[in-house]
Image (tube, rainbow, N blue to C red):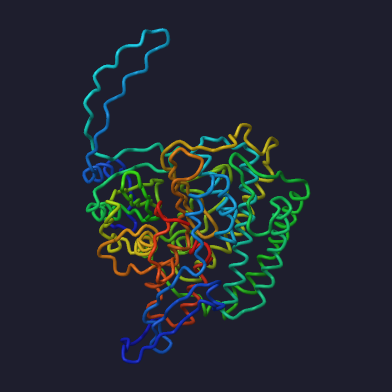
Amino acid sequence: MSHPLPINNQESFVLNLGPQHPATHGVLRVKLTMDGEYIMHAEPVLGYIHRMHEKMGENRTWAQFMPNTGRMDYLSALSFNHCYAALVEKAMGIEVPERAEYLRVITVELNRISSHLVWFGAFILDLGGFSPLLYAFDDREHILDLLESVTGSRLTYCYFRFGGLYNDIDENFVDGTREFIKTMRERLPMYHNLVTKNIILIKRIKDIGPISKETIRKYGATGPVARGSGIDYDIRKNEPYSIYPEFDFDIPVYTECDSMARYMVRMDEIEQSMRIIEQALDKLPEGPIMAPKVPKILKPPKGDYYQAVESARGSLGMRAVSDGTNKAYRLKVRSPTFSNLSLFSEVSEGMLLPDALALMGSLDLVIPEIDR
Amino acid sequence: MNMVNGIFMDFNKLKERLTALALIEEVPATPPAAPAKGEEEQPPAEPAAPVSRPAASETDYPVRGFHLDVKVAADSVVAAATILDEEGFFLEAVTGVDWIKDKELEVVYDYTIWQPTCRVVIRTRLNREAPEVPTISEVCPGANWHERETHDFFGIKFSGHPDLTPLLLPEDADFHPLLKDFQV
């Protein structure tokens, strides 16, 4: 709902949302200029957990930077692993064995589901519903256990290596993943019955926070935010990497542009990710998980390189400039939510505060990934 | 032409439009072939005169990750952004590179488009002592934060930018950590 009357500047006041506020998911502060319950102007204030990963990228060898990639987006760390590994492999011309590519896709897609589950729980929590979070964390726990068994960690993964992976999977992982997919397929209809069809949720997010196609493009928003505005753009399809072209999956696109559309895109993506994992498990080839001859000291040829992957939140890009030494001369990380959040100021203008919080939740913000 | 749904079809047209903006660079003429084995070493021939050409080149996408690389003068970045915006591109990121040995700072703009796959890089070099480049945030509002971030990290001034206060660094930061002479 937009502001019905001309905004009266005389009676405006400033409201601080955050930096410690449950609805901002971490330390994001938004400086709101309010007219009663309506937002006149919203200004996100960033940087509370800025760690300068890009400088660390210049001070460490190429391989030493890999653990950093797991610490930017704590919900879909494997996408960052994937982007960085693919970037350096591209620069070095390293061929990754087929089995490793399959395992990369399986683990990244599991990670995407777990990320969407946290978003699902937290989003409903923002809107005042507590119990879906507990259900979502229950399901997510299975994924974390599975990923822990192969990667060794539960959140800040450092599983990818240049030319392959750190660890192979075993029978238990395959059985556990199939079991999880079976359970999740039973849980999703329940989520839809409990939450998606819930009249309170519909009233809170349907037609709320519409983002036009043009706004999406002008701000460079990507991922489920763009796909909720009718844009069929997914790096996995539009700029295929790894072995995604081998799989049959759909890109959910909704044209309503509202928070509900973004909600539906992510819910549908859970099913699509499960389809990819199933196909990958069926076709999983035998073989090595590491390329045979990866040099111990990496010195990519001079020049700059760009790699994009689809993280759970959108188009994640890394640009490396190499000067031919064992360290990056420059390493830029283009994080998707940085661009996705930048449109908040424009879109939230004239909105009711609770509606703006619904909009913010539907953007799926992960602050350490914005701040880097 | 409807820009929102405008499907970018003609790579050559885009290349032509951007080439018109590109700087003219001098590249050495084709280097002489190395003498074959067994052949007696020839005295080096007179170096051929360098060739002038616009600094816009198609790059090898599978190796580099982008299709078109254009070097422009600092005052052409807005024109380049306008052309790309008209063709339906959007801005992915703005960043800098500190070429301290050349006493220059480079600003790199990454653009891409929804359909089809095409990535364009626009770059410009600035004097390291007084780095200043016009803002493109009027053409691409999304550039606002990217430019602020680049100002934080490199101290590059984006003239005409509405608000260059630190975005990711502390509000009183007077240092630029990605400069190569910044001591950690």
Tell me where residue B148 appears, x and y as whole percent. Answer: 36, 64
Query: Where is the N terminus of chain A found, in terms of image quarters?
Result: bottom left
In the figure, residue A10 lies in which quadrant? bottom left
Tell me where residue B77 appears, x and y as whole percent. Answer: 26, 53
Tell me where residue A254 appears, x and y as whole percent. Answer: 48, 63
Tell me where residue A185 appears, x and y as whole percent. Answer: 68, 60
- Which residue is depicted at the point 50% across and 48% down? A237
Using the image, determine if residue A238 lies above or below residue B153. Answer: above
The reply to whether residue A215 is in sight is yes
Along the viewing direction, whichever of B153 and A88 lies nearer the viewer: B153
Q: Is residue A101 left or right of residue A259?
A: right
Along the viewing direction, whichever of A152 and A204 lies nearer the viewer: A152
Residue at the farthest bottom position: A11
- Which residue is depicted at the point 36% across and 8% down? B40
The reply to whether residue B111 is in sight is no
Using the image, determine if residue A222 lies above or below residue B164. Answer: above
